Amino acid sequence: MASCEIGDVSNCMQSAPPMPWFGMDIGGTLVKLVYFEPTDSSSAELEAERGAVKKIHHYLTSNSAYGTTGKRDVHLQMYNVVCGGRTGTLHFIRFPTSAMHVFLQLAKSKGMAYMSSTVCATGGGAFKFEKDFHNEMNMELHKFDELDSLIRGIHYIKAYNKPECYYWSNPTDDEKCKKEYFDLNNLYPFLVVNIGSGVSMLAVHSPDNFKRVTGTSLGGGTFLGLCCLLTGCETFEEAISLAEKGDSTKVDKLVRDIYGGSYSKFNLQGDIVASSFGNMISKSKRAAVKKEDLARATLVTITNNIGSIARMCAVSEGINKVVFIGNFLRVNILSMKLLAYAMDFWSAGSLKALFLEHEGYFGAVGCLMELMKTGN
């Protein structure tokens, strides 16, 4: 089969699969869906387009919300990208994995069960929901490796979206803190820290040379799960909103709480966390704490743990650029600034924390690239 790398337009046009073109990443918490909308169709092609394709296209592109939980991230749309030899727009859609059966019924009602389109998917849910796709939609999922898809998606998007990568300057100073863009041409080697429900870390030396270094089960799913238990919140957005209003120092035991100030011998400043949730040993402090403080402390705990492991991995691999991605960072500037500060401080300025605009969609984009290889 013809490969569909960037620039291999003639081969892609000969082997392109039937429309519509999707890529899916079915994670433990969120499903990420990428849809390619061709914008170079001739009038004859538009006339010949089948009813179901038109119906799906109109529904996806004319709405930014689907039911009560599905969202299209309009601000992330990418225009004039080349995919399968066609020029068009990439749309980015997400919904909770818990709503998969609702999604299947909705897709069925739009006619997808009667189409020949291939569904390429990655993530654990590609295995978990395989039978549901077959029973509900009479569709077979073409499953692809999660980390291969992730790296493939990163390289595709960075080729088309030049202001994709950025960092935070002066992350601890609200007045001076600024989002600065980073030149992706000088990216290699880099460490990818993918923060979803859990966390995976990959050392990337080139588009074809990468390996998983380690990971941790304490990720975005942990943050949301603990917040739901501790605060009664229901959604990730609500948990982040609570954290933004909280004070984690009322929950965490700091260096100054133990030493009465900084521990200068090891350059440990007084406001550094010595024991996450350490103040909750005290009954009186438990009684005084608010749910906002608990949410903030939970966010700080999870973020600090991820940053600590990422730093050790980067040092071990001899890498000085760490790229943080994943839906944990969506609407979560707090964690990004914490990670930016931690990487800089604990490495004495030798490590740089970088972030990507499309956060958790890279696996789905990588699957779309695999779809281009399936042909007819």
Image (cartoon, rainbow, N blue to C red):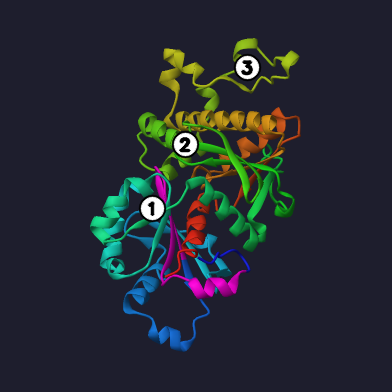
Q: Along the horizontal axis of the image, is 3 left or right of 235?
A: right
Could you tell me the amino acid type at mark 3? Val
- Residue 273 position in % (x across, y down): 59, 22
Q: Residues within 10 Å of mark 3 (few under 14, many from 20)?
A: some
Per the image, is 91 magenta?
no
Which one is in front, 134 or 286? Answer: 134
Give the labeled residue for mark 2.
198
Tell me, yes or no, if residue 175 can be seen here.
no
Which residue is found at the position 47% from the left and 38% from the top?
220
- Residue 132 position in % (x across, y down): 27, 52
Q: Secondary structure at mark 2?
A: loop
Q: Earlier in the sequence, mark 1 or mark 3?
A: 1
Could you tell me the amino acid type at mark 1? Phe
Give the alpha-carbon distance from disc 3 to disc 2, as whole Å.
Answer: 28 Å
Give the labeled residue for mark 1.
95
Q: Is residue 59 shown above or below 142?
A: below
Q: Earlier in the sequence, mark 3 or mark 2?
A: 2
Which one is in front, 66 or 78? Answer: 78
Which one is in front, 242 or 203? Answer: 203
Which residue is found at the position 76% from the left and 34% from the top?
349
Residue stretch in magenta: 8-35
Give the labeled residue for mark 3.
255
Which one is in front, 188 or 176? Answer: 188
Quadrant where the C terminus sits is bottom left
Taking the view exactly as shown, the residue that stands out farthest to the bottom is 44
Residue 328 disc label: none
Could you tell me the amino acid type at mark 2? Gly
- Residue 191 position in % (x across, y down): 64, 40
Per the image, is 24 magenta?
yes
Which residue is found at the position 64% from the left and 23% from the top?
271
